[in-house]
């Protein structure tokens, strides 16, 4: 596995479904373009106090952290078997290795709570997580709790034009954009910015949202 391997696999899978097989060079290029878009969108600084929710083995977070090697992150997940220092160290070692495992502080939450301190983070990242949450309302409320006043929540999601029952890889259904946006509105989150980071040209596309809490 190499740098951005999971992103590359996802993009390759999307294109295989939509347009037939594509070359490794093409998928590598698309993955890097996607990562560059995300990094511009987040505009991270070493002064930011950040939490990444649902980190897993770090496949989304490590490329972001490599772009800001002086940035520190609070890492949160409910599963310590996949989200731990050893797993993220391996992911870092297989990349360009600009970040350090010492930049990550690990915490473990539950299905309804991050168990992180209140009003602590000015940027909260939630990448490829929302569609997998069993208790979406409770978790979004808790994420608002840990956010500093005037902080930002960045959400990246795979979205679909037409609903599908379950995804073959993660075994959860993806949301349509109207349903996703209604979920944010119902939970008092306002979308300040949004951008497509990857589009298959078929039913699925990936979009990032910068959100604030409504007053």
Image (tube, rainbow, N blue to C red):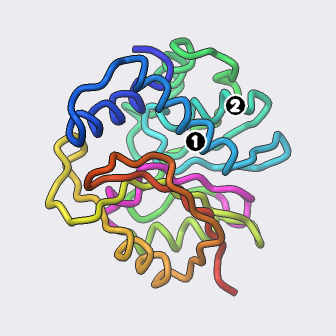
In primary-sequence order, the first of circles 2 and 1 is: 2
Q: Write down the quadrant of residue 116 in the picture.
A: bottom right
Q: How many labels does the image show?
A: 2
| Closer-to-camera residue (212/107) | 212
Residue 152: image location, x then y, percent: 68, 64
> Left of 89 or right of it: where is 129?
left
| Closer-to-camera residue (117/199) | 199
As drawn, 189 above or below 155? below
Callout 2 crowding tier (Cα within 10 Å): few <14, some 14–19, many ≥20:
some
As drawn, 63 above or below 153? above
Q: Does the magenta stretch include residue 68?
A: no
| Local secondary structure at mark 2 | helix
**Residue in the picture at 62% in, 15% down:** 96
**Residue in the picture at 47% in, 32% down:** 30
Q: Write down the quadrant of residue 159 in the picture.
A: bottom left
Residue 45: image location, x then y, percent: 81, 43
> Left of 116 or right of it: where is 6?
left
Residue 39: image location, x then y, percent: 66, 41
**Residue in the picture at 37% in, 76% down:** 178
Question: In the rendered image, which quarter contains the N terminus?
Answer: top left
> Left of 195 or right of it: where is 129?
left
Residue corresponding to mark 2: 67
Residue corresponding to mark 1: 75
> What's the magenta region?
117-135
| Local secondary structure at mark 1 | strand
Q: Which mark is residue 116?
A: none
Q: Closer to the camera: disc 2 or disc 1? A: 2
In space, the residues marked 2 and 1 are separated at their CA atoms by: 17 Å
Residue 146: image location, x then y, percent: 64, 64
As drawn, 90 above or below 112? above
């Amino acid at each position: 596995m190499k740098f951005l391997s999971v992103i590359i696999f996802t993009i390759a899978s999307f294109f295989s479904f939509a347009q037939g097989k594509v070359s490794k060079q093409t998928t590598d290029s698309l993955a890097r373009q996607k990562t560059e878009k995300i990094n511009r969108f987040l505009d991270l600084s070493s002064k930011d106090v950040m939490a990444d929710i649902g980190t897993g083995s770090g496949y989304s977070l490590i490329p972001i952290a490599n772009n800001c090697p002086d940035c520190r992150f609070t890492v949160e997940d409910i599963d310590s078997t996949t989200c731990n220092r050893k797993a993220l160290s391996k992911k870092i070692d297989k990349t360009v290795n600009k970040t350090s495992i010492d930049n990550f502080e690990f915490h473990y939450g539950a299905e309804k709570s991050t168990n992180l301190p209140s009003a602590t983070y000015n940027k909260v990242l939630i990448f490829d997580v929302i569609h997998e949450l069993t208790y979406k309302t409770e978790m979004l409320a808790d994420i608002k709790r840990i956010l500093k006043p005037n902080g930002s929540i960045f959400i990246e999601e795979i979205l679909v034009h037409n609903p599908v029952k379950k995804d073959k890889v993660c075994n959860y259904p993806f949301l349509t954009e109207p349903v996703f946006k209604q979920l944010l509105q119902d939970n008092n989150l306002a979308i300040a910015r949004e951008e497509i980071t990857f589009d298959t040209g078929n039913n699925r596309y990936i979009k990032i949202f910068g959100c604030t809490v409504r007053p």
